[in-house]
Image (tube, rainbow, N blue to C red):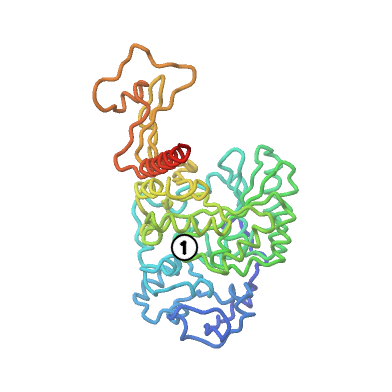
Amino acid sequence: MQQFDRVETVVTEEQAAEPPSTLRVADGAPSVCPTLREITPTLNTTQWNDWRWQVRNRIRTLDQLAAYVPSLSGRAELQKVIDKYPMAITPYYATLIGRADLSDPIFRMSVPNAQELCDSSSLSDDPLEEHEDMPVPGLVHRYRDRALLIATTMCSMYCRHCTRKRIAGTRESAISPRRLRQVVEYLTAHPEISDVIVSGGDPLTMSDAALESTLAALRSVPTVQIIRIGTRTPVVLPMRITDELVAMLKKYHPLWVNTHFNHPNEITEQSRAACAKLADAGIPLGNQTVLLRGVNDTPQIIEKLCRELVKTRVRPYYLYQCDLVRGVEHFRTSVRKGIEIMEYLRGRISGLAIPTFVVDAPHGGGKIPVLPTYIVSMSPTHTVLRNYEGMLVNYPEPGIEAEPSMSAPAGEPGVWELASGQASVILPSRNQRMKRREKIASRSRCAAETASLFEL
């Protein structure tokens, strides 16, 4: 990518050249998936918890992957995938694989698949047209008040569904001081930009010093009010959230972090601890989940994920429809599936735990919220609304009264009667909430009757 110069990253060229050690976990070190338990020299806990060691020992080649998955087939096709879309899996994330095939959500998100080479005509390398909205190399300015800075092309793990497959991992480098100065100049000349998202790649693969230089440069622009960091490290490399990193981030408040949990299996003791460190430092946490076929495309999985996120003090922020990116067709679901999931969530979990389902529109159209239809009908006097139970209610508009001459026809009311103000509610049969109310009312009547007997 022209907008990036090769600069110091957290892994030196010498370290990158080191052959990754295979992993056998020593007594007292983290337990691993049975498929990984039989493969390596002993490793101590100190090494395991060193995020730099994790990055140096990522699974990068087909031979390394085959050591973890001896039953790996179709190696010639997989090599073509890796040549086009680089692979990297942290040892930590590899241990979350419960079954070494595509039925396992962690395996599916991290291990290359020959289907990545099968594209439909509707897909493109850059469907969001980020490059067209890049007035300065590395800075995407789409919304009036926001800009996105691609600070690095490196991730600790390359997700197979990545929206930036065109650049992620093709050259592991970070934005140079010269490019960063150009970004600062642009932000200074455009005071309407008050919110900058630092993205990549993954910004937290940068060293503390390099990341701080980026944050300090952004903070030097007086009109930049909010800085957000988009990162998947709490999910795939939780040991990166060190005390030193958190202490540095605290200096640049108001600062937010959005992370990227896609499945409940990714929420572990280690990832919870990483999120807790950030939350305890006063850094608000949001989560951006991508709806992925075969990973999380059922209402029950998304419900469990959202519940676990809130327990971890992470606010479910977005549920993304998978972008029209080359190499991810096998992950895509229908928009209808996303609406079905949103319909299921409403009324079952708190609004705090419900993300906004969005389609990031092609051609740079931005995020479009997509919701089930809750407005049934509208008239000048009333709006008819549907709730999660199927109950229909009319909501009177302010300052307008229904015509007094109107009278409801005989029989059960319909939507017209609600919209005209002739009826106020239509309840579905077998409504559980109404049954609970009846029980409460029945108990209250019994209590009142008992009390009146004693009064006699």
Q: Quadrant of residue 389?
A: top left
- Residue 345 image position (x, y, % from top left): 42, 49
Outermost residue, front side: 456
Q: Amino acid at mark 1?
A: Pro
| Residue under the point 68% across and 60% down | 211
Q: Which residue is mark 1?
A: 264
| Residue under the point 38% across and 31% down | 393
Q: Quadrant of residue 446?
A: top left
Where's the N terminus, which quadrant?
Answer: bottom right
Q: Is residue 370 visible?
A: no
- Residue 19 image position (x, y, % from top left): 56, 82
Q: Is residue 368 left or right of residue 121?
A: right
444, 77: nearer the viewer: 444
Where's the C terminus, which quadrant?
Answer: top left
Q: Is residue 398 left or right of residue 438?
A: right
| Residue under the point 37% across and 41% down | 438
264, 261: nearer the viewer: 264
- Residue 205 image position (x, y, % from top left): 62, 65
Q: Is residue 200 visible?
A: yes
Residue 323 drawn above or below residue 95: above
